[in-house]
Image: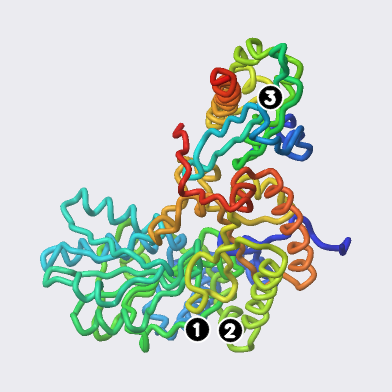
Amino acid sequence: MAYSQKVIDHYENPQNVGSMDKADPQVGTGLVGAPACGDVMKLQLKINDDGIIEDAKFKTFGCGSAIASSSLVTTMVKGKSVTEAEQVSNAEIARELALPPVKIHCSVLAEDAIKAAIADYRKKHADA
Amino acid sequence: MSSDLRLPLYFDNNATTPCDPRVVEAMVPYLFEHFGNPASRSHAYGWAAKEAVEIAREQVAELIGASPKEIVFTSGATESNNLAIKGVARYNAKKGKHIITVATEHKAILDSCHALEREGFEVTYLGVDAEGLISLDELRAAIRPDTTLVSVMFANNEIGVVQPIAEIGAICRENGVLFHCDAVQALAYVPIDVKAMNIDLLSITAHKMYGPKGVGALFVRRGRPRVRVQPIIDGGGHERGIRSGTLPTHQLVGLGKAAELARLAIESGEVDQIRALRDRLWAGLQENLDELYLNGSWEHRLPNNLNVSFAYVEGEAMMMGIKQIACSSGSACTSASLEPSYVLRAMGVDVELAHTSIRFGLGRFNTEAEVDHALELITEKVRFLREMSPLYEMVKEGIDLKSIQWTAH
């Protein structure tokens, strides 16, 4: 498997690995994928009252491309508004990491993770 | 960390092995000095080559307790497997068109069987239990009056599990069915006696026993019963018409030498040293890490193989992390088809664990220093990846992963 240098960099120095408190009202948690598929991503976003993503943390069970995709995503969304983050597409992620066709699904999952985290945050605030 | 270790460490001896320097030394003169065609009967170049080939034939025969007349040289075990399965099935087609094999066999066997199915043969694929072993009762029950061949590999290439070969041979003999055994993974590590084990055909390759790639043999029994096979290659009628094609002298010298060294290694206890290294690796991993699962029977296993699932850490990510160790993974990501290992699936290993499996194959040239270096590296990387794993985190929090509704993708 020939990895692009970007994928290797993210794998060896993953950005923003960690966890936030799920119960915190400012935190949206997205858990996507399935162990049976070999890919599970947990993405957590800390969103302030102005709708800006202040912080992002991830944990991923998956191959190098999956880890790189989720690591990259945390750097892409930090500082963006929720609306802007929702626009992040898997194509951008795949391009940035130079993912081969067989790994595109990793970038799709990362895009799903963003949307899932935002949906979770919205759900918490809809109930309020 | 020792600085004179050759990196990456080679722990993939189930995939192939380096040539033993003694094998290479034996081969070289047959490339440009004694380069004759063994079939050239009329001059000294041919005679010298023929002599070397016949010595190789004896060396191979001695490794498995056969007579040299029962050894047919081929280009490797894939060809031997094709010849055994297709050759025996087609020769005996009038007697019956049913074959029995196992779901965990090598692709050379499975795909040969699929080809026969397209020709109108019927194949029964026996399942294996959670340890990777077949059931002798199931085998007995599967044998029918029209069964002509049973094919079961001596030891599996992925999990290293060794089947009850002598018992299988006895059952086949009782029922008048021929028994073929792909012995590729076992030749360098386990004593094989085709007479005692009632084996009728046996596939051999050089490159899993420290010989060159591209050469092998098929043992075809000549006495009680006399086995006949239909050739799959037509041509000059070499190897008593069974396998045409000029014999590659230097390759066969390599095969013969490798076979001789394998026999001596088994007799001298060198194999026990390899087993000790493998055991050291497994013991060390268990001491340093939790949530490890051995794939396949520990008791019935090749002495050099270790196939472990590192739960909650995906196989390809592991391989990237331990790229200073050459090994292989049963994870879907590392296979071209994105399907996890069919061998692990046949054993009923959870798909999640199949994704996290790594195969280590130790060999003649591995050392204790290498194993210790590998232990350090693997431990470090598994801990690094588990820090990153949402699954490990959930398990440590006491969450039952099976209770989660995952989003499929």
C-alpha span from label 2 to label 1: 7 Å
The residue at which mark 1 appears reads as: B191
The residue at which mark 2 appears reads as: B266
The three-letter code of the residue at mark 3 reads Gln
Residue B271 x/y as whole percent: 62, 81
* Numbered disc 2: secondary structure: helix
Image point (63%, 10%), residue name: A83
Mark yes or no: residue B95 visible. yes
Locate residue B259 relative to residue B163 in the image: left or right: right
The residue lying toward the viewer, choosing from B86 and A21, is A21
The relative height of residue B265 versus residue B25 in the rendered view (above or below) is below
The three-letter code of the residue at mark 2 reads Ile
The residue lying toward the viewer, choosing from B405 and A4, is B405
Tell me the subunit letter for badge 2: B
The residue at which mark 3 appears reads as: A26
**Dot 3: within a 10 Å radius of its alpha carbon, few (fewer than 14), some, or many (20 or more) residues?**
many
Image marks 2 and 1: residues in contact by CB distance under 8 Å? yes
C-alpha span from label 3 to label 2: 66 Å
